Amino acid sequence: MPTVYLSLGSNLGNRQAQLTTAITLLTERAGNIPVLSDFYETEPWGFQSQHPFLNIAVKLETEFSPFELLAITQQIERELGRNAKTSNSSYQDRLIDMDILLYDNMVLNTAELTLPHPLMQQRLFVLKPLAEIAPEIRHPILGRTIETLLNKLDEKQS
């Protein structure tokens, strides 16, 4: 059964309730979540907002293909009030955001889905929770562990 790592975030409304509901729906529809990280409060990335994010990483064991899982996560986002990923190619506040970071060691680049997530190594709000639950997992393209990627990004931002 494939192992998938996802990043979830929310910066509007009851952020923790949104994330908890998303995790419940993922478990009901996509598979088993044996591990999840703590919640991390972070500043918005790629846009300005007065609303900080709450982020979490989850490990998911699923029988669904990457594209089936993408459809499930997008449906959950819509049900929880998410209208669009971006507005005019820029990021914005959101009730819920779910990104597939890693799907086993798969490398995929299509118009619909890129694996591993192409920006994960640039985002502390992704790497910190992911390193908590999967520090030794290796990025399938960069060949470095999540912990190493986090330490490298921490050094750059210090």
Image (tube, grey):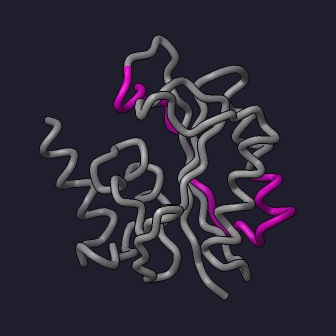
User: In the rendered view, would you say 130 is above or below 32?
Assistant: above
Residue 102 location (% of width, % of height): 48, 69
Q: Is residue 74 above or below residue 107?
A: above
Tell whether position 12 is magenta: no
Where are the magenta residues, as a range? 23-47
Q: Quadrant of the N terminus?
A: bottom right
Front-most of residues 13 and 68: 68
User: In this figure, what is the number of numbered marks?
Assistant: 0
Residue extending farthest right: 28
Q: Residue at x 41, y 30 (%)?
A: 90
Q: Residue at x 42, y 49 (%)?
A: 126
For residue 33: magenta?
yes
Instruction: Single out the residue that lies furthest toward the top.
Output: 50
Q: Is residue 39 left or right of residue 49?
A: right
Residue 79 placement, left or right of 156: right
Instruction: Tell me residue 34's x, y (percent).
Output: 69, 69
Tell me what residue is drawn at x 28 percent, y 76 percent: 141
Q: Is residue 17 above or below residue 76?
A: above
- Image coordinates for residue 58, horizontal then vertical, percent: 60, 59
From where the camera sits, is residue 17 visible? no
Q: Quadrant of residue 16?
A: top right
Residue at horizontal 69 percent and vertical 35 percent from the top: 82
Quadrant in the picture for the C terminus: top left
Please state the horizontal and vertical placement of residue 6, each as a whole percent of the image: 56, 59
Residue 4 in view, yes or no: yes
